[in-house]
Amino acid sequence: MGRSLVFLLVQAPLAVLLTAGYAVVACVAALADRSGRTTREVGGAWSRVLLRLFRVEVRVSGQEHVPAGPAVYAANHGSALDILIVFGYMPVDFRIVYKKSLSFVPLVGWAIRLGGHVPIDRGNAFRARRSLDAAARRIRGGTSVAVFPEGTRSPDGSVRRFKRGSFGLAIEAGVPIVPVSLVGVKSVVPRGLTSLRPGAVHVVLHPPVPAAGRSPDEAEALAEEVRRIVAAGCHPERPE
């Protein structure tokens, strides 16, 4: 049986059932623990189970670079498994920054909303500004966040331009940015989930890049600085 057929007939249906079950448990956990920590732990367990189902092994290095306080963790985005890898294996308690509209997606969206993740409303400039201000206050209050600054998945595994929004958020919150390289994701998912194959991914956490004291005008330069670190970690043999 071909890999795509195995995914469509076996792995995908099991993944859907597991995800629905996770979302129900996560919603209940969020109602019992308003801090969102229990929901985050449920999400991590769900991610690890799915990755085992897909026969994807994950190794993590650079844990010594995790700062003591809150930070923005910025990772490259090359596959549909990236969110599972980050949720399942990042050695920190964090929340994701997500589009507020996802809050209304049944089960999974509800779990995200109840789990204390950080919504950004991009409906108009005024609401977007208010959302960013609220997100910065959450981060200053001790909540680390994980972001994929490329915005969309890279089709060829190269680390594309990082959008400046997450870096402006780090500057406003006065917290460091931890570059995160997800190495080998394209070898596991070369062309979408139907091309999924067993393999290994390496999560590399790099030393934090300070953002405190920088001006908002420096967000673009900061984004490029972090992108270069992430890209070098993904492709150490390729100059960036």
Image (cartoon, rainbow, N blue to C red):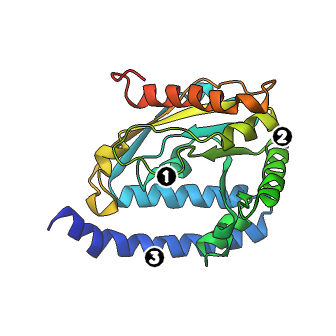
Mark 1 belongs to which amino acid? Thr
Q: Position of residue 186 (x, y in %)?
A: 33, 45
- Spatial CA distance of label 2 from label 3 is 37 Å
Residue with the mark numbered 1: 152
Q: Nearer the viewer, mark 1 or mark 3?
A: 1
- Spatial CA distance of label 2 from label 1 is 27 Å
User: Is the residue under label 1 in contact with that under label 2 (CB below 8 Å)?
Assistant: no
Mark 2 belongs to which amino acid? Arg
**Residue 104 falls in image quadrant:** bottom right
Residue with the mark numbered 3: 17
Q: Nearer the viewer, mark 2 or mark 3?
A: 2
Q: Secondary structure at mark 3?
A: helix
| Vertical arrangement, residue 51 with respect to residue 180, above or below | below
Q: Position of residue 205 (x, y in %)?
A: 54, 31
Kindly identify the residue that appears in the image at 60 percent across and 42 percent down.
163
Q: Position of residue 77 (x, y in %)?
A: 47, 46
Residue with the mark numbered 2: 140
Pick whichever of labels 2 and 3 is earlier in the sequence.
Answer: 3
Residue nearest the viewer, comparing 113 with 39: 113
